[in-house]
Amino acid sequence: MRKSDRFLLFLLGLLALLEAARLHSLHRGRERDEEVRAMASMARRLGLTDLVLATDARYARHPSQADRFAPFQDHPTSLEHFPSGTLVAPPPP
Amino acid sequence: MKRPRIPTWLERQRYLLDFTLSSLGRRKGKNLALASLYTLVVFGLASVLMYTQALRGEALRVLEGAPDVVVQRMVAGRHDLIPGDRVERLSRIRGVQEARGRLWGYHYDASAKANLTFLVPEKFWGKPGEVVIGEGVARTRLAAPGEPFPILASDGSVVVLKVRETIPSTSELVSSDLVLLSESDFRRLFGVPPDLFTDVALTVPNEKEVATVANKIRGQMPDSRPITHAEIARTYEAILDWRSGLVVLVLAAALLSFGIVAWDKASGLSADERREIGILKAIGWDTSEVLAVKVWEGAVISLSAFLVGLLLAYVHVFVTPAPLLAPVLKGWSTLYPSFRLTPALNPFLVSTLFLLTVVPYTVATVVPAWRAATTDPDAVMRS
């Protein structure tokens, strides 16, 4: 087999895998829809305001309920020291 | 006499591709290293973009049910407990259908070294003395339904509650660290007097009135801070948008490393590559054919790396629980949710990544080749 044919087959294989990923996303997306609806209904029932992404700092656990200066309010010239706080940007003003 | 057949454009391109692949094979080590680095850059970039995009979409859909307005009381710049009479005052504001005092707070559990979120639901379905816990709490505390759940109260005594049930693991993204309990247990544990609440949740049925209601609250209760539903949604858009810490960090590193590779390519050809171009020109190839080979060379490496990187990122983010990204968000958390995101192959994201990676690389490959191919073959080989 010519080298160009081998390469084109390789590319076609990758494109087929990409299509498989797209089909997987559609299938799994439908399954996940129900779970997301259940979570939304739980958020409504319990009045939840935030996702559980990080639990190490209060302002990282509930970023929407925290002040912009929350990471720095513990004492004057206090520095932010939680890794999650450095990656999760503060809420917009 | 049989005339020699002139190859069609397609056949011509296949011959050029054959030549390109053989040429790449002659510098196998270098090209494999380049393709691997390229794949890694696409993988990192695609992983972060897919992860944050899926998380943002999920946050906006899940938090659709968040309260219309949350009113906090501020004392000396800090969030403080809000008196019960304000619930009544807030419910009288025109446009507010219902005002409900909420009770929730954090508790650092020294035995599990984890922060738990205690919350009193509006209608708690358990009995006093019982708790409903999130899957993360059950995992960290090794607690199961029917088992005791001891908590150190604010007065130093140990209050032993009983686990009624665990919240299903499919909703860990919102419930992993939750401990739901009755109002009396909450007040006993944290020593909160009966007429105080953590904050007040308002129901404002008309979306257009939310901003007006928030302004009225600021006017009537200057020490309060209303947080609207739109602000909650905006927070998650800001946290997970491309300018957020996580994305900027990876984007900057990826573009920098990519810039180095492209600069290396664009700054000149190796002696071998120049000699090759010189020989091709000397045996009769014209400039357009040399350029076509170089375009193929760029396309072979960048297309393969782009597709492999993209597929690996998809598997990393949506098939496995994103083992390389999840620890970044977890930080120092000892209690964190285990969740799978809604998979999505967004065409906009794929085309953006394609334009960011494949196009500049291919251009960077062609420019120095064009310079070499347009000079005299003798000069190219001698230089």
Image (cartoon, coloured by chain):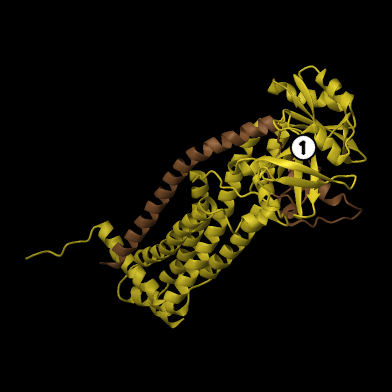
Between A52 and B14, the one lying in front of the other is A52
> What hue does chain A carry in this figure?
brown
Residue B73 placement, left or right of A52: right
Does the rendering let one see residue B226?
A: no
Q: Chain letter for mark 1, please.
A: B
Residue B144 image point, x, y percent: 66, 46
> Crowding near pointer 1: few (<14 within 10 Å), some, many (20+)?
some
Look at label 1 and name its amino acid. Gly
When asked about the image quadrant of residue B376, the answer is: bottom left
Residue at disc 1, secondary structure:
loop
The chain in yellow = B
Residue A88 placement, left or right of B279: right
Between B146 and A8, the one lying in front of the other is B146
Residue B136 image point, x, y percent: 66, 48
Residue pointed to by mark 1: B129
Residue A87 image point, x, y percent: 71, 53
When asked about the image quadrant of residue B4, the answer is: bottom left
Q: Is B169 placed above or below B371 here?
A: above
Does the rendering let one see residue B304?
A: yes
Residue B128 placement, left or right of B173: right
Q: Quadrant of the N terminus of chain B?
A: bottom left
Residue B337 image point, x, y percent: 64, 49
